[in-house]
Amino acid sequence: MSAHPLSDIVKSYDVRGLVATQLTPEVAYALGVAVVDELGLEGKGFIVGYDMRPSSPELARALSSGAESAGAHVRHVGLASTDMVYFASGVFDEAAAMITASHNPPEYNGIKFARAGAKGVSLNTGLAGIRDRAEAWLAAGNTPVISATEPAADDVLVRYAEFLRGLVDLSGVRPLRVVVDAANGMAGYTVPAVLGDGAGLEGLPLEIVPMYFELDGTFPNHEANPLEPKNLVDLQEAVRHHRADIGLAFDGDADRCFVVDEHGDPVSPSVVGSIVARREIHRVRNQLGEDTPTVLHNLICSNVVAETIAAQGAVPVRTPVGHSLIKDEMARTQAVFGAEHSAHYYFRDFFGADSGMVAAMHVLAELGHSDKSLSEIASDYMPYVQSGEINTRVADVDAVISRIEQAFVDRATIDRLDGLSVLGPREGEGMWWFNVRASNTEPLLRLNVEAGSTQTLQAVITEVHALIAG
């Protein structure tokens, strides 16, 4: 092994690697030993769940065996969505690991770690230490002893479904026809329990039209990444065919949810974030008497999110992009809700963690208590036009960002919260802003632009593209 065999797979917020060569059972075992040592879990509980990928059960056994060898008491929850594991971490107040590579192709797998109470673990808050300890364990020539039998699992699905229904009451909504594309991922396991009667709970006024609910980590129908437009095509056609009220698309580990309206048109995550933000602000004001709750939004969300938060008398807080960063900020600010444009949605009442299912339930509640269609509701939150994320492969990201900054420094506001944000006029059709950031994993520059008109949007994109090309 090289001196740092894990540096290629331990990313900013989780572990991702090829199962045949990078994230092997031996490596998973070493990471199990390392997480117990790094987080001080000897003699404490440690939750392990896994997704439907063919490699996941073996990696879960390996990680669990390593953790047990280091003195942790492992609580196996078996098949789970990522937010189910966060739920277990919050309810039992124990550290946790979820075996998943989310939306990556089937030859990949990964691990998402959480401290007790579903608190984040990033490279700066423990993940680097876990990596270094695992590397040292492997370099010492230790031999893993991995359990060959599948352990008995604590079934938390029913408790999870009950908890989510307690967060968002759907019992009184008007009847809705809902097409759900699970992409052969974990939503095929959780949606019947939460939105149907699969966990033995009372049925809801929802007619669920299932798509690809069979758990299959080879993803035979399409990739489990709903942010890619090609992966929404089947859902869009099904919504129109069934004359459904709404369509929901989940990623592989079901922690992200993407929404389409009754026409099959995508509803921007910023629109979803605005809808949920307004609902959560009203809820805590009415139920808890919080007059000015805090709501987080990352810096590539549409301006409409911050404007919606402020219009409701709450405090919008702009954050960098990144899962663990936002979880840390949720805890620091006690924010009631946080939105990312990647369709991650964070809830204070869900232990500050993200749940695509809770966000979907809020949208269903909003629609089900309104006589408007989803497209009509969404149109109230769409004053601007957006480019979506545009990725360009560049040789020297820092040099390109510096060139862009110099071109705009005298005629716009420069912000370095995360990458480079350039803010132009704030109002009218001439409004625009853009952000350029380096990818964490590839030599790519990520560009997001928003403007007050299509003409302004295109002009900004054209100018920034020219600067990227040099």
Image: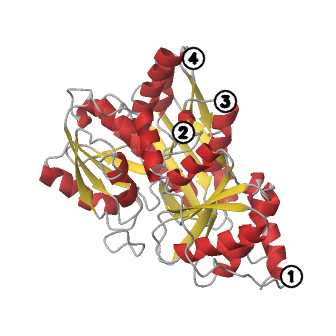
Q: Mark 1 or 4 closer to N-term?
A: 1
For marks 3 and 4, the one nearer the N-term is: 4
Disc 2 to disc 3, how far (Cα)? 15 Å
Q: Position of residue 73 (x, y in %)?
A: 71, 61
Image height check: is 299 above or below 143?
above
In the picture shown, does residue 129 fall above or below 165?
Answer: below
Q: Earlier in the sequence, mark 2 or mark 3?
A: 3
Q: Which mark is residue 140?
A: 1
Cα–Cα span, label 4 and label 2? 20 Å
Label 2 sits on what residue type?
Phe
Q: Residues within 10 Å of mark 2 (few under 14, many from 20)?
A: many
> Which residue, given by chain and number where applicable, does mark 4 sit on?
292
Q: The residue tagged with tag 3: helix, strand or loop?
A: helix
Residue 163 visible at all: yes
Q: Secondary structure at mark 1?
A: loop
Q: Which mark is residue 350?
A: 2
Please tell me how crowded label 3 is: few (under 14), some (14-19), or many (20+) other residues with Cα within 10 Å: few
